[in-house]
Image (cartoon, rainbow, N blue to C red):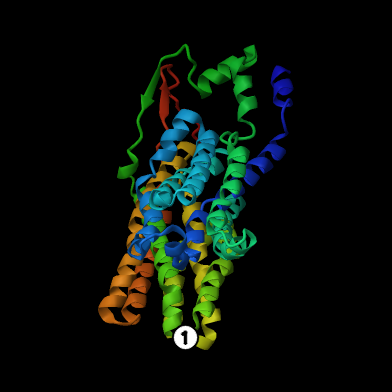
Protein backbone atom coordinates (compact mmCIF):
# COMPACT_ATOMS: atom_id res chain seq x y z
CA UNK A 1 0.00 0.00 0.00
CA UNK A 2 2.82 2.39 0.84
CA UNK A 3 4.42 1.72 -2.54
CA UNK A 4 1.17 2.49 -4.37
CA UNK A 5 0.56 5.70 -2.42
CA UNK A 6 4.05 7.02 -3.06
CA UNK A 7 4.08 5.88 -6.66
CA UNK A 8 0.79 7.68 -7.36
CA UNK A 9 1.95 11.00 -5.90
CA UNK A 10 3.52 12.19 -9.15
CA UNK A 11 2.51 11.99 -12.81
CA UNK A 12 1.59 8.60 -14.21
CA UNK A 13 4.21 6.51 -16.05
CA UNK A 14 2.77 7.32 -19.50
CA UNK A 15 2.65 11.05 -18.84
CA UNK A 16 6.16 11.05 -17.43
CA UNK A 17 7.45 9.05 -20.39
CA UNK A 18 5.80 11.54 -22.74
CA UNK A 19 7.41 14.48 -20.95
CA UNK A 20 10.81 12.80 -21.10
CA UNK A 21 10.39 12.16 -24.84
CA UNK A 22 9.41 15.80 -25.37
CA UNK A 23 12.49 16.90 -23.44
CA UNK A 24 14.74 14.59 -25.49
CA UNK A 25 13.39 15.96 -28.77
CA UNK A 26 13.94 19.51 -27.53
CA UNK A 27 17.51 18.63 -26.57
CA UNK A 28 18.14 17.07 -29.98
CA UNK A 29 16.89 20.15 -31.83
CA UNK A 30 19.48 22.23 -29.92
CA UNK A 31 22.46 20.11 -30.96
CA UNK A 32 23.03 21.45 -34.51
CA UNK A 33 22.04 25.15 -34.86
CA UNK A 34 25.28 26.33 -33.23
CA UNK A 35 27.08 24.84 -36.26
CA UNK A 36 24.67 25.40 -39.14
CA UNK A 37 23.95 29.04 -38.27
CA UNK A 38 27.65 29.84 -38.65
CA UNK A 39 27.88 27.83 -41.88
CA UNK A 40 24.95 29.78 -43.30
CA UNK A 41 26.62 33.19 -42.79
CA UNK A 42 30.27 32.25 -43.28
CA UNK A 43 30.80 35.01 -45.85
CA UNK A 44 29.54 37.67 -43.41
CA UNK A 45 31.75 36.83 -40.44
CA UNK A 46 34.71 38.91 -41.60
CA UNK A 47 32.68 42.12 -41.64
CA UNK A 48 30.54 41.41 -38.59
CA UNK A 49 33.24 40.14 -36.22
CA UNK A 50 36.49 41.22 -37.92
CA UNK A 51 37.45 37.58 -38.33
CA UNK A 52 40.43 36.96 -40.59
CA UNK A 53 39.17 35.16 -43.69
CA UNK A 54 42.07 32.74 -43.37
CA UNK A 55 40.52 31.45 -40.14
CA UNK A 56 37.17 30.50 -41.73
CA UNK A 57 38.20 26.88 -42.45
CA UNK A 58 39.33 26.56 -38.84
CA UNK A 59 35.98 27.89 -37.65
CA UNK A 60 34.22 25.17 -39.62
CA UNK A 61 36.49 22.46 -38.24
CA UNK A 62 36.48 23.49 -34.56
CA UNK A 63 33.09 22.01 -33.60
CA UNK A 64 33.93 18.62 -35.12
CA UNK A 65 37.30 18.61 -33.35
CA UNK A 66 35.51 19.44 -30.11
CA UNK A 67 33.19 16.49 -30.72
CA UNK A 68 36.18 14.20 -31.08
CA UNK A 69 37.87 15.06 -27.78
CA UNK A 70 34.91 15.66 -25.45
CA UNK A 71 33.08 12.32 -25.69
CA UNK A 72 34.06 11.08 -22.19
CA UNK A 73 32.75 14.22 -20.47
CA UNK A 74 29.10 13.18 -20.73
CA UNK A 75 29.35 9.81 -18.92
CA UNK A 76 31.70 11.37 -16.34
CA UNK A 77 29.15 14.09 -15.54
CA UNK A 78 26.28 11.59 -15.56
CA UNK A 79 27.96 9.50 -12.87
CA UNK A 80 28.28 12.55 -10.62
CA UNK A 81 25.14 14.56 -11.35
CA UNK A 82 22.70 12.07 -12.86
CA UNK A 83 21.94 11.83 -16.57
CA UNK A 84 19.25 14.51 -16.77
CA UNK A 85 21.20 17.08 -14.78
CA UNK A 86 24.34 16.38 -16.84
CA UNK A 87 22.47 17.11 -20.09
CA UNK A 88 20.91 20.23 -18.53
CA UNK A 89 24.35 21.51 -17.52
CA UNK A 90 25.66 20.89 -21.04
CA UNK A 91 22.80 22.93 -22.51
CA UNK A 92 23.45 25.77 -20.05
CA UNK A 93 27.09 25.83 -21.16
CA UNK A 94 25.91 25.75 -24.79
CA UNK A 95 23.65 28.76 -24.18
CA UNK A 96 26.51 30.67 -22.53
CA UNK A 97 28.86 29.83 -25.42
CA UNK A 98 26.33 30.99 -28.01
CA UNK A 99 26.05 34.36 -26.30
CA UNK A 100 29.73 34.87 -25.47
CA UNK A 101 31.05 34.07 -28.94
CA UNK A 102 29.08 36.95 -30.50
CA UNK A 103 29.09 39.37 -27.55
CA UNK A 104 32.91 39.34 -27.49
CA UNK A 105 34.29 39.02 -31.05
CA UNK A 106 37.63 37.75 -29.77
CA UNK A 107 35.78 34.73 -28.35
CA UNK A 108 34.20 33.65 -31.63
CA UNK A 109 36.65 30.77 -32.14
CA UNK A 110 36.93 29.67 -28.47
CA UNK A 111 33.17 30.06 -28.03
CA UNK A 112 32.48 27.87 -31.05
CA UNK A 113 34.84 25.22 -29.68
CA UNK A 114 33.13 25.38 -26.27
CA UNK A 115 29.73 25.07 -27.98
CA UNK A 116 30.98 21.94 -29.74
CA UNK A 117 32.09 20.42 -26.44
CA UNK A 118 28.70 21.16 -24.86
CA UNK A 119 26.88 19.66 -27.85
CA UNK A 120 28.93 16.48 -27.66
CA UNK A 121 28.44 16.18 -23.90
CA UNK A 122 24.68 16.26 -24.31
CA UNK A 123 24.64 14.18 -27.49
CA UNK A 124 26.37 11.13 -26.02
CA UNK A 125 23.83 10.96 -23.19
CA UNK A 126 20.71 10.97 -25.40
CA UNK A 127 20.93 7.19 -26.14
CA UNK A 128 21.55 6.52 -22.44
CA UNK A 129 18.33 8.31 -21.48
CA UNK A 130 16.44 6.42 -24.20
CA UNK A 131 17.80 3.12 -22.88
CA UNK A 132 17.11 4.01 -19.23
CA UNK A 133 13.48 4.77 -20.08
CA UNK A 134 13.05 1.66 -22.25
CA UNK A 135 12.37 3.87 -25.25
CA UNK A 136 11.25 2.27 -28.50
CA UNK A 137 12.61 2.85 -31.98
CA UNK A 138 10.21 5.78 -32.25
CA UNK A 139 12.07 7.49 -29.39
CA UNK A 140 15.41 7.18 -31.18
CA UNK A 141 13.78 8.17 -34.47
CA UNK A 142 12.25 11.33 -33.04
CA UNK A 143 15.59 12.27 -31.47
CA UNK A 144 17.52 11.76 -34.72
CA UNK A 145 14.87 13.71 -36.61
CA UNK A 146 15.36 16.46 -34.02
CA UNK A 147 19.04 16.63 -34.99
CA UNK A 148 18.12 17.10 -38.65
CA UNK A 149 15.34 19.57 -37.88
CA UNK A 150 17.69 21.65 -35.74
CA UNK A 151 20.28 21.67 -38.53
CA UNK A 152 17.70 22.79 -41.09
CA UNK A 153 16.23 25.46 -38.79
CA UNK A 154 19.65 26.86 -37.98
CA UNK A 155 20.65 27.19 -41.63
CA UNK A 156 17.25 28.35 -42.85
CA UNK A 157 16.34 30.91 -40.18
CA UNK A 158 19.60 32.73 -39.59
CA UNK A 159 19.08 35.16 -42.50
CA UNK A 160 15.41 35.93 -41.66
CA UNK A 161 16.36 36.40 -38.01
CA UNK A 162 19.12 38.80 -38.99
CA UNK A 163 16.57 40.88 -40.89
CA UNK A 164 14.09 40.66 -38.00
CA UNK A 165 16.75 42.03 -35.62
CA UNK A 166 17.42 45.04 -37.83
CA UNK A 167 20.46 43.57 -39.60
CA UNK A 168 22.19 42.41 -36.40
CA UNK A 169 23.99 39.16 -37.14
CA UNK A 170 25.10 38.90 -33.51
CA UNK A 171 21.49 38.78 -32.27
CA UNK A 172 20.53 36.31 -35.00
CA UNK A 173 23.23 33.94 -33.72
CA UNK A 174 22.75 34.58 -29.99
CA UNK A 175 18.98 34.03 -29.99
CA UNK A 176 19.56 30.27 -30.25
CA UNK A 177 20.53 30.34 -26.58
CA UNK A 178 16.82 30.63 -25.75
CA UNK A 179 15.81 27.11 -26.94
CA UNK A 180 18.96 25.76 -25.26
CA UNK A 181 17.78 27.19 -21.93
CA UNK A 182 14.31 25.75 -22.51
CA UNK A 183 15.80 22.33 -23.23
CA UNK A 184 17.84 22.52 -20.02
CA UNK A 185 14.70 23.19 -17.99
CA UNK A 186 12.81 20.28 -19.57
CA UNK A 187 15.53 17.62 -19.39
CA UNK A 188 16.97 18.10 -15.89
CA UNK A 189 14.80 15.43 -14.23
CA UNK A 190 14.73 12.92 -17.07
CA UNK A 191 17.49 10.49 -16.19
CA UNK A 192 15.39 7.71 -14.66
CA UNK A 193 12.71 5.50 -16.08
CA UNK A 194 9.09 6.36 -15.20
CA UNK A 195 8.78 3.42 -12.80
CA UNK A 196 12.18 3.55 -11.17
CA UNK A 197 11.18 5.76 -8.25
CA UNK A 198 8.27 3.59 -7.21
CA UNK A 199 10.37 0.48 -7.59
CA UNK A 200 13.06 1.91 -5.36
CA UNK A 201 10.55 2.77 -2.66
CA UNK A 202 9.08 -0.71 -2.80
CA UNK A 203 12.46 -2.37 -2.45
CA UNK A 204 13.42 -0.14 0.43
CA UNK A 205 10.78 -1.69 2.72
CA UNK A 206 10.03 -5.18 1.45
CA UNK A 207 7.20 -7.14 2.91
CA UNK A 208 8.03 -10.29 4.80
CA UNK A 209 6.70 -12.44 2.00
CA UNK A 210 9.04 -10.68 -0.48
CA UNK A 211 12.23 -11.17 1.51
CA UNK A 212 13.08 -14.59 0.15
CA UNK A 213 12.51 -13.51 -3.43
CA UNK A 214 14.70 -10.47 -3.00
CA UNK A 215 17.59 -12.51 -1.66
CA UNK A 216 17.45 -14.69 -4.76
CA UNK A 217 17.05 -11.87 -7.29
CA UNK A 218 19.38 -9.19 -5.94
CA UNK A 219 22.17 -9.05 -3.38
CA UNK A 220 21.12 -7.73 0.03
CA UNK A 221 23.19 -5.07 1.72
CA UNK A 222 23.75 -7.52 4.57
CA UNK A 223 25.27 -10.14 2.24
CA UNK A 224 28.80 -9.70 0.87
CA UNK A 225 28.77 -8.92 -2.84
CA UNK A 226 31.49 -10.07 -5.21
CA UNK A 227 31.59 -7.77 -8.24
CA UNK A 228 32.55 -9.57 -11.43
CA UNK A 229 34.09 -7.19 -14.00
CA UNK A 230 32.97 -7.23 -17.61
CA UNK A 231 35.34 -7.25 -20.54
CA UNK A 232 36.51 -3.64 -21.18
CA UNK A 233 34.66 -1.78 -23.92
CA UNK A 234 37.80 -1.45 -26.02
CA UNK A 235 38.09 -5.25 -26.16
CA UNK A 236 34.56 -5.85 -27.47
CA UNK A 237 34.56 -6.11 -31.24
CA UNK A 238 30.92 -5.09 -31.62
CA UNK A 239 31.72 -1.80 -29.89
CA UNK A 240 34.39 -1.10 -32.49
CA UNK A 241 32.03 -2.02 -35.33
CA UNK A 242 29.36 0.37 -34.00
CA UNK A 243 32.03 3.06 -33.61
CA UNK A 244 33.26 2.51 -37.16
CA UNK A 245 29.71 2.73 -38.51
CA UNK A 246 29.03 5.97 -36.63
CA UNK A 247 32.34 7.53 -37.64
CA UNK A 248 32.13 6.61 -41.31
CA UNK A 249 28.59 7.91 -41.76
CA UNK A 250 29.54 11.13 -39.95
CA UNK A 251 32.65 11.48 -42.11
CA UNK A 252 30.47 11.19 -45.21
CA UNK A 253 27.96 13.69 -43.85
CA UNK A 254 30.50 16.40 -43.08
CA UNK A 255 32.31 15.89 -46.40
CA UNK A 256 29.02 16.16 -48.32
CA UNK A 257 27.71 19.20 -46.46
CA UNK A 258 31.06 20.98 -46.78
CA UNK A 259 31.50 20.54 -50.55
CA UNK A 260 28.13 19.70 -52.10
CA UNK A 261 27.20 23.32 -52.83
CA UNK A 262 30.64 24.01 -54.34
CA UNK A 263 30.32 20.91 -56.53
CA UNK A 264 26.84 21.92 -57.71
CA UNK A 265 28.09 25.36 -58.72
CA UNK A 266 30.75 23.62 -60.82
CA UNK A 267 27.90 21.76 -62.56
CA UNK A 268 26.43 25.07 -63.69
CA UNK A 269 23.95 25.89 -60.92
CA UNK A 270 23.81 29.35 -59.39
CA UNK A 271 25.06 29.88 -55.83
CA UNK A 272 21.48 30.43 -54.64
CA UNK A 273 20.26 27.22 -56.27
CA UNK A 274 23.20 25.27 -54.85
CA UNK A 275 22.47 26.60 -51.35
CA UNK A 276 18.80 25.66 -51.75
CA UNK A 277 19.75 22.13 -52.76
CA UNK A 278 22.00 21.86 -49.72
CA UNK A 279 19.01 22.77 -47.53
CA UNK A 280 16.93 20.24 -49.49
CA UNK A 281 19.58 17.61 -48.67
CA UNK A 282 18.77 18.05 -44.95
CA UNK A 283 15.01 18.39 -45.31
CA UNK A 284 14.61 15.37 -47.57
CA UNK A 285 16.24 13.18 -44.95
CA UNK A 286 14.00 14.12 -42.01
CA UNK A 287 11.43 11.30 -42.53
CA UNK A 288 14.23 8.78 -43.04
CA UNK A 289 15.96 9.80 -39.81
CA UNK A 290 12.66 9.19 -38.00
CA UNK A 291 11.79 5.85 -39.59
CA UNK A 292 15.25 4.24 -39.72
CA UNK A 293 15.47 3.53 -35.94
CA UNK A 294 11.88 2.26 -35.94
CA UNK A 295 12.56 -0.20 -38.76
CA UNK A 296 15.92 -1.16 -37.21
CA UNK A 297 14.10 -2.47 -34.12
CA UNK A 298 12.93 -5.39 -36.27
CA UNK A 299 15.78 -7.93 -36.48
CA UNK A 300 14.88 -9.14 -39.96
CA UNK A 301 14.94 -5.58 -41.30
CA UNK A 302 18.11 -4.69 -39.40
CA UNK A 303 20.04 -7.52 -41.04
CA UNK A 304 19.36 -5.98 -44.44
CA UNK A 305 19.38 -2.30 -43.46
CA UNK A 306 22.77 -2.11 -41.74
CA UNK A 307 24.86 -3.13 -44.77
CA UNK A 308 22.27 -1.98 -47.31
CA UNK A 309 22.39 1.67 -46.30
CA UNK A 310 26.11 1.88 -46.94
CA UNK A 311 25.68 0.51 -50.45
CA UNK A 312 22.75 2.88 -51.03
CA UNK A 313 24.88 5.88 -50.05
CA UNK A 314 27.58 4.76 -52.48
CA UNK A 315 25.07 4.54 -55.34
CA UNK A 316 23.51 7.90 -54.43
CA UNK A 317 26.91 9.61 -54.42
CA UNK A 318 27.69 8.26 -57.88
CA UNK A 319 24.25 9.37 -59.01
CA UNK A 320 24.95 12.96 -57.90
CA UNK A 321 28.32 12.79 -59.69
CA UNK A 322 26.93 11.55 -63.00
CA UNK A 323 23.54 13.29 -63.14
CA UNK A 324 23.10 16.49 -65.18
CA UNK A 325 22.18 19.70 -63.41
CA UNK A 326 18.52 19.39 -64.40
CA UNK A 327 17.87 16.34 -62.19
CA UNK A 328 20.11 17.18 -59.27
CA UNK A 329 17.04 17.98 -57.18
CA UNK A 330 16.05 14.32 -57.38
CA UNK A 331 19.57 12.93 -56.87
CA UNK A 332 20.42 15.24 -53.95
CA UNK A 333 17.10 14.32 -52.33
CA UNK A 334 17.89 10.61 -52.65
CA UNK A 335 21.33 11.20 -51.16
CA UNK A 336 19.75 13.11 -48.27
CA UNK A 337 17.34 10.25 -47.57
CA UNK A 338 19.94 7.48 -47.39
CA UNK A 339 22.51 9.65 -45.57
CA UNK A 340 20.00 10.68 -42.90
CA UNK A 341 18.81 7.10 -42.55
CA UNK A 342 22.43 6.14 -41.89
CA UNK A 343 22.64 8.64 -39.04
CA UNK A 344 19.36 7.37 -37.59
CA UNK A 345 20.65 3.80 -37.76
CA UNK A 346 23.96 4.81 -36.16
CA UNK A 347 22.10 6.25 -33.17
CA UNK A 348 19.81 3.22 -33.03
CA UNK A 349 22.72 0.79 -33.01
CA UNK A 350 24.05 2.39 -29.83
CA UNK A 351 20.75 1.55 -28.12
CA UNK A 352 20.02 -1.78 -29.81
CA UNK A 353 23.51 -3.25 -29.35
CA UNK A 354 23.85 -2.23 -25.66
CA UNK A 355 22.96 -4.48 -22.75
CA UNK A 356 21.78 -1.66 -20.47
CA UNK A 357 21.76 2.11 -19.84
CA UNK A 358 25.32 2.30 -18.51
CA UNK A 359 26.60 0.39 -21.53
CA UNK A 360 24.60 2.65 -23.85
CA UNK A 361 26.17 5.73 -22.29
CA UNK A 362 29.72 4.44 -22.59
CA UNK A 363 29.20 3.05 -26.10
CA UNK A 364 27.66 6.37 -27.12
CA UNK A 365 30.70 8.22 -25.80
CA UNK A 366 33.07 5.85 -27.60
CA UNK A 367 31.23 5.80 -30.91
CA UNK A 368 30.57 9.53 -31.05
CA UNK A 369 33.91 10.60 -29.58
CA UNK A 370 36.10 8.50 -31.85
CA UNK A 371 33.57 8.72 -34.66
CA UNK A 372 33.58 12.50 -34.81
CA UNK A 373 37.37 12.53 -34.54
CA UNK A 374 37.38 10.41 -37.70
CA UNK A 375 34.66 12.57 -39.24
CA UNK A 376 36.80 15.69 -38.93
CA UNK A 377 38.98 14.25 -41.71
CA UNK A 378 36.08 14.09 -44.17
CA UNK A 379 35.95 17.73 -45.35
CA UNK A 380 39.74 18.00 -45.35
CA UNK A 381 40.39 14.86 -47.41
CA UNK A 382 37.57 15.63 -49.84
CA UNK A 383 38.93 19.13 -50.38
CA UNK A 384 42.51 17.91 -50.86
CA UNK A 385 41.43 15.33 -53.44
CA UNK A 386 39.58 18.01 -55.35
CA UNK A 387 42.59 20.33 -55.24
CA UNK A 388 45.07 17.64 -56.31
CA UNK A 389 42.98 16.35 -59.20
CA UNK A 390 41.33 19.58 -60.33
CA UNK A 391 37.96 17.84 -60.58
CA UNK A 392 35.36 15.98 -58.54
CA UNK A 393 35.42 12.47 -59.98
CA UNK A 394 38.15 11.11 -57.70
CA UNK A 395 36.55 12.76 -54.66
CA UNK A 396 33.14 11.21 -55.28
CA UNK A 397 34.55 7.78 -56.10
CA UNK A 398 36.60 7.90 -52.88
CA UNK A 399 33.49 8.80 -50.88
CA UNK A 400 31.58 5.97 -52.56
CA UNK A 401 34.36 3.55 -51.61
CA UNK A 402 34.11 4.78 -48.04
CA UNK A 403 30.37 4.08 -48.14
CA UNK A 404 31.14 0.47 -49.11
CA UNK A 405 33.36 0.23 -46.01
CA UNK A 406 30.41 1.67 -44.07
CA UNK A 407 28.30 -1.24 -45.32
CA UNK A 408 30.91 -3.70 -44.00
CA UNK A 409 30.93 -1.97 -40.61
CA UNK A 410 27.14 -2.23 -40.47
CA UNK A 411 27.30 -5.93 -41.23
CA UNK A 412 29.79 -6.52 -38.40
CA UNK A 413 27.89 -4.31 -35.94
CA UNK A 414 24.77 -6.49 -36.10
CA UNK A 415 26.50 -9.87 -36.28
CA UNK A 416 28.65 -9.66 -33.16
CA UNK A 417 27.59 -10.16 -29.52
CA UNK A 418 25.75 -7.42 -27.66
CA UNK A 419 28.05 -4.86 -26.02
CA UNK A 420 27.94 -5.21 -22.25
CA UNK A 421 29.83 -3.32 -19.55
CA UNK A 422 27.05 -3.40 -16.94
CA UNK A 423 28.57 -4.34 -13.55
CA UNK A 424 27.69 -7.85 -12.41
CA UNK A 425 27.53 -9.07 -8.82
CA UNK A 426 27.59 -12.58 -7.45
CA UNK A 427 25.60 -13.26 -4.28
CA UNK A 428 27.82 -15.14 -1.84
CA UNK A 429 24.91 -17.37 -0.88
CA UNK A 430 24.80 -20.92 -2.13
CA UNK A 431 22.34 -20.23 -4.96
CA UNK A 432 25.27 -18.98 -7.07
CA UNK A 433 23.11 -16.58 -9.11
CA UNK A 434 24.63 -13.67 -10.98
CA UNK A 435 22.62 -10.44 -11.09
CA UNK A 436 23.04 -7.06 -12.72
CA UNK A 437 23.80 -4.08 -10.53
CA UNK A 438 23.32 -0.42 -11.41
CA UNK A 439 20.55 -0.44 -13.96
CA UNK A 440 21.41 -3.30 -16.23
CA UNK A 441 18.77 -5.16 -18.14
Please give the residue where the numbered disc 1 appears in the rendered image: 323
Q: Quadrant of the N terminus?
A: top right
Q: Relative to residue 387, is residue 183 depicted above or below?
A: above
Name the side, left or right, on which 253 lies relative to 27: left
Q: Relative to residue 49, is residue 281 depicted above or below?
A: below
Residue at the spot 58% in from the left edge and 67% down from the top edge? 283
The image position of residue 20, as x and y in percent, is: 63, 41
The image position of residue 418, as x and y in percent, is: 42, 46
The image position of residue 97, as x and y in percent, is: 47, 46
> Callout 1: 10 Å neighbours few (<14), some, many (20+)?
some
Residue at the spot 42% in from the left edge and 17% down from the top edge? 430
Residue 419 visible somewhere in the drawing: no
Residue at the spot 51% in from the left edge and 76% down from the top edge? 332
Residue 244 visible somewhere in the drawing: yes
Residue at the spot 51% in from the left edge and 37% down from the top edge? 89
In the picture, residue 429 is in which quadrant? top left
The image position of residue 440, as x and y in percent, is: 49, 34
Nearer to the camera, 154 or 218: 154
Amino acid sequence: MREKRLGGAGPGPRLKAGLILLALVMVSINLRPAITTIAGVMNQLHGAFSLDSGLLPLLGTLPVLAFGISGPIGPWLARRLGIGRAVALALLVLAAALILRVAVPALLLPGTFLAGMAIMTASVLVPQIVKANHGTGWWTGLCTMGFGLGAALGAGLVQPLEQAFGGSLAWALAVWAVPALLGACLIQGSGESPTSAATTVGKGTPAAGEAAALTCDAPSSAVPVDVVPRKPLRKQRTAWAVTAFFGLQAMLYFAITSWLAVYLVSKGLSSADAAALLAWFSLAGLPASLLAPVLASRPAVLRIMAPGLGLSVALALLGVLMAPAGIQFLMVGMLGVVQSAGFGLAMALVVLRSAGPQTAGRLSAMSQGLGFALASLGPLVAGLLHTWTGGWEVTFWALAAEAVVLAAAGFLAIRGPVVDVEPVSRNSSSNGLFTLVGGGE
